[in-house]
Amino acid sequence: MAGRNTRKRRKKIVRFPGGMHMNIGVIVFMFVAFYMVYNVYTYLTQVHVKSYEVAKGTIEVNTSYTGLILRKETIVNAEQSGKLDFYLKDHTKASKGTLLCSVDENGNVSERLNEAVDVSSVLTKENMGGIHSSIRDYAQGYDDLSFYSTYNFKSDLSGQLMEAVNLSALGVISEYTEFAKDNQTFHLYRANEPGVVAYYTDGMENITTDALSPGLFDQSAHKKQSLKTEGAVESGQPLYKLITDENWQIAVQLDQAMKNELQGGEVTQIRFKKDQSTAWANYTIERRGGQDYLILSLRNGMIRYADERYVDINILLDQQTGLKIPNSSIATKTFELVPYSYLTSSDTSSETGLYVEHRQQNGTFTKSEFVPVTVYYIDKDADENGVENADSETWTAYISDPKIKRGDRVARKDSTDRYEVQNTAKLKGVYNINRGYAVFRQIEPLFSNDNYTIIKSQTTYGITQYDHIALDGDAVEEGQLIMTG
């Protein structure tokens, strides 16, 4: 511009000794290019692993068993032969005097009963309201994951319809039924005591804990006979049975491991696999014919399993809480064992290590040199009760260093004592990758399931909450550079 002094911009030149010239822009470009190449090289050479952040968690300790249901059951037999009709749906509570079924000797009442079953005219508003309510509740609570409930709903609805229709029809032909009763050809059967009615038998109604045997748990040999399929009954044959006590038992064949877990206790929690409901049960352990049985005693919920003789359960022993890690993170590493008392520091540093004499091919040993080592675990020679030995001379250190091989000797500082490295042992652990490289850390498992393990926290050589570990413990090695992702 006019009136202003202008200056020519000059490129900055870096002069090197010997007259060599270099533009500063070229230097910056070379630096950036080198940095990018270095990062690409590092990315390509590092191992890429997925990481897992260690957190506190809980694993439920449970064991699956199939139990045999024992309860107080009374079978009621027919006193006459004839056509059979039911008036109360299966697996329903009946009070004393509730009408359950009828036997028609000549079949006339039963035939008229069927003729009177016209749903449009027989079902009352109250009946229809109950059925609509059942359908609405089922529709609102439907879940694809529990489709088995559809069959239960179908059975319940059929029973509800049968109960409503037959009772109403019986009222329609009351004059005829009274005539038949007077002639003693039509017989009504009512509950002679309160209970849950069930229209099946299986020959196991009188089984008690005293009669337990392995054969009773063979479900392939179990024969369940429905009493509603024939539509007729012979004198002396079962009509129905009543389960007359809400208290019931589940018997389980017990293995030694579970027996040891439960020994000395009185109460445990169980989960029913069918609907995932839980219950607390008192229990005893009884032995019959060389087999141990767990007898679980319950005080409610029996009606839900009134149509079953066997039930699948989980015994919920406890909940283990600690640091929760994936099983895939757990790896096994082999270590050399050396006396803990040989560990020392060098004369020039505070590093912990060993004075090592390496075995040569001719069998002689080199001059002692100090090798810094990492101690991965110290076995403090604890007794069977877990009490550690206070004498450190009995302790064993687990080390792993490429400079120390089997056959080498370690020397006690300022002593003629020597120990030849021979013994090895394996430890379970995980690889800590907090610093970008893999470091093995020993773990103390408390409990495992199919996916996770709970480990003891606050161990000397272990891991802590929020540490990052390799998700796949077998994919990395000690000291390996790690890039998470």
Image (cartoon, rainbow, N blue to C red):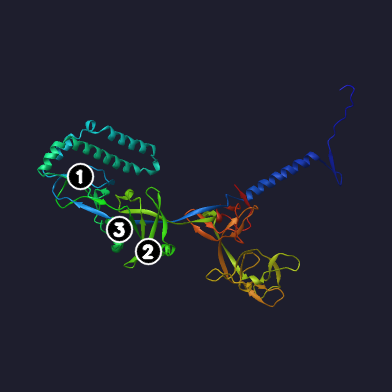
Q: Which residue is mark 1?
A: 101
- When the figure is inspected, residue 49 is found, relative to residue 1, above or below; the finding is below
Residue 67 figure quarter: bottom left
Q: Is residue 195 left or right of residue 348?
A: left
Residue under the image location 31 percent in, 36 percent down:
130
Q: Residue furthest top?
A: 2
Q: CA distance from mark 2 to mark 1?
A: 41 Å
| Amino acid type at mark 3 | Asp
Q: CA distance from mark 1 to mark 3?
A: 33 Å
Residue 158 place in picture, x, y as percent: 27, 40
Q: Is residue 21 left or right of residue 118?
A: right
Viewer-side residue, 303 vs 483: 303
Asked whether residue 11 appears in the rendered view, the answer is: yes
Q: Which residue is mark 2?
A: 285
Residue under the image location 66 percent in, 46 percent down:
40
- When the figure is inspected, residue 187 is found, relative to residue 442, above or below; the finding is above
Labels 2, 3: front one: 2
Q: Is residue 180 left or right of residue 101?
A: left
Labels 1, 3: front one: 1
Query: Alpha-carbon neighbours of circle 2 within 10 Å: few (<14), some, or many (≥20)?
Result: some
| Amino acid type at mark 1 | Cys
Q: Residue furthest left?
A: 183
> Looking at the rendered structure, which numbered label has been put on residue 121?
none
